[in-house]
Amino acid sequence: MATDPLRLPTDKIVRPDKDRFLNEENPFEAMMSRFDRAAQLLDLEPGLYKVLRHPEKQIIVSVPVLMDSGEVEVFTGYRVLYNTSRGPAKGGIRFDMQVNLEEVKALAAWMTWKCAVVNLPFGGAKGGVICDPLKMSVGELERLTRRYTSGIIATLGPDSDVPAPDVNTNERVMAWVMDTYSMQARHTVTAVVTGKPIELGGSLGRREATGRGCMFMVLEALKHLGMPVQGTTVAVQGFGNVGSVAADLMAKQGCRIIAISDRTGGYHNKAGIDVPGALDHVKKHRSLEGFTGGDPITNEELLTMPVDVLLPAALENVITSKNASKVQAKIICEGANGPTTAGADSILEEKGIFVIPDILANAGGVTVSYFEWVQDRGGYFWTEDTVNQRLEDIMTRSFQEVLQMSKTHKVNMRTAAYMLSISRVAIVHRLRGIYA
């Protein structure tokens, strides 16, 4: 009788205990601890478990750049394709001094599960370059982007690997990536990246998509928990693209945003922050520093305020085993990637806090990136109302699917989201088999 290769080897697999972490703040270990928990509950066959635990491809490139000074600097760039069984790899490129391979691997895995949990025909990828873009001129950034793109160009393509903006990258950077790829292809290929300028095939509604998706998730959670939208108190850590859009949209729905913050600090106003005023302040001053619409607080204080909804939309690892017991929110909607460490999960669950995990909560961005990719390939572009309606349909349906998985298996929403996404990736692997 033929043997199913995905069930080999049959020796016992030792999976890390869900409450043991070698390094709580290591993003790859945090992601894998959650993966292991979901895999156990799914009774994932040993061979397939091993396949899904390893990234498909890890690329490290040297990126020499001629600086404005006339000197040559050599930067290090990464691109990780974690899994492409469901379709082309999808994931952002970040420029940051903290970029490292472990982080990129974790983010690529998160993208795999994120695309699967909202049922997009994509796999997961991530990329980054170790640099300080704030200290580089526009010309230096363009040369860095084009050389990095050339270094990873063998993986790029609308059918293989589709980058997008991430930390410290934007529409202009994506235009440079698209142009570099198109020059090599000898024709314009708009679908090779998403998050582009509208004039180059970008999608309406893309910039607001992640924050809008968070708003949809908060509304669904409030409905599930029987809490009224009107007057719901919200604290938003991170007033960048995601947090500011989410805060603005939630305020328009009737929520009361009582605290906001960015890297310069935070502000609290019990009566409600004037969100349009805060947006104007950031537009003029590029940060919240000096905002007069509330009493100054620290980012740490914001995380532990007594609110109905906490939206961490800034950095990774801000809710840890050290401060999770102090969190007083009833709902946490993870606008950032990995804001809660694996060590904090059980503490939040014991406190009865309803956590909307990052792979679901902030999937609005990749969903509208998918819409952009579809529009580019079809050469037909949608109205912003159409984009927003289709985003709402996918996000609310996905919330209900994760919630049903949570109820069926009596697990929290994070574990349920991982179970749903891993099961979808696993099904495709079983159908495709192992190429030999």
Image (cartoon, grey):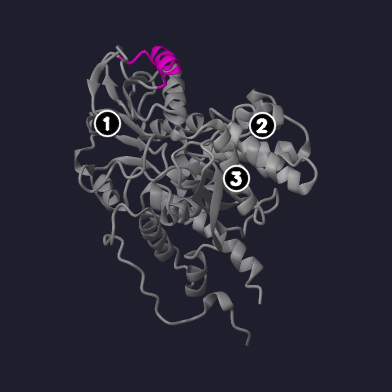
Disc number at residue 138?
Answer: none
How far apart in space, not on screen, are marks 2 and 3 (Cα)?
A: 13 Å
Q: Are marks 2 and 1 in contact (CB under 8 Å)?
A: no
Which residue in the structure is indicated by mark 2?
202
Q: Is residue 119 left or right of residue 182?
A: left
| Residue 105 located within the stretch drawn in magenta | no
In x, y percent, where is residue 153? 66, 52
Provide the residue designation for mark 1: 299
Q: Position of residue 414 (x, y in %)?
A: 39, 49
What type is the residue that disc 1 sits on? Answer: Asn
Work out how far the residue at label 1 is from the one at label 3, CA to CA, in angstroms. Answer: 31 Å
- The foreground one among 212 and 128 is 128
| Label 2 – label 1 distance at C-alpha | 34 Å
What is the secondary structure assignment of the residue under circle 2? Answer: loop
Q: Is residue 284 magenta?
A: yes
Circle 2/circle 3 CB separation < 8 Å: no
Q: From this viewpoint, is residue 393 visible?
A: no
Between disc 2 and disc 1, whose residue precedes? 2
Q: Quadrant of residue 229?
A: top left
Region rendered in magenta: 272-286
Which of marks 3 and 1 precedes in the sequence?
3
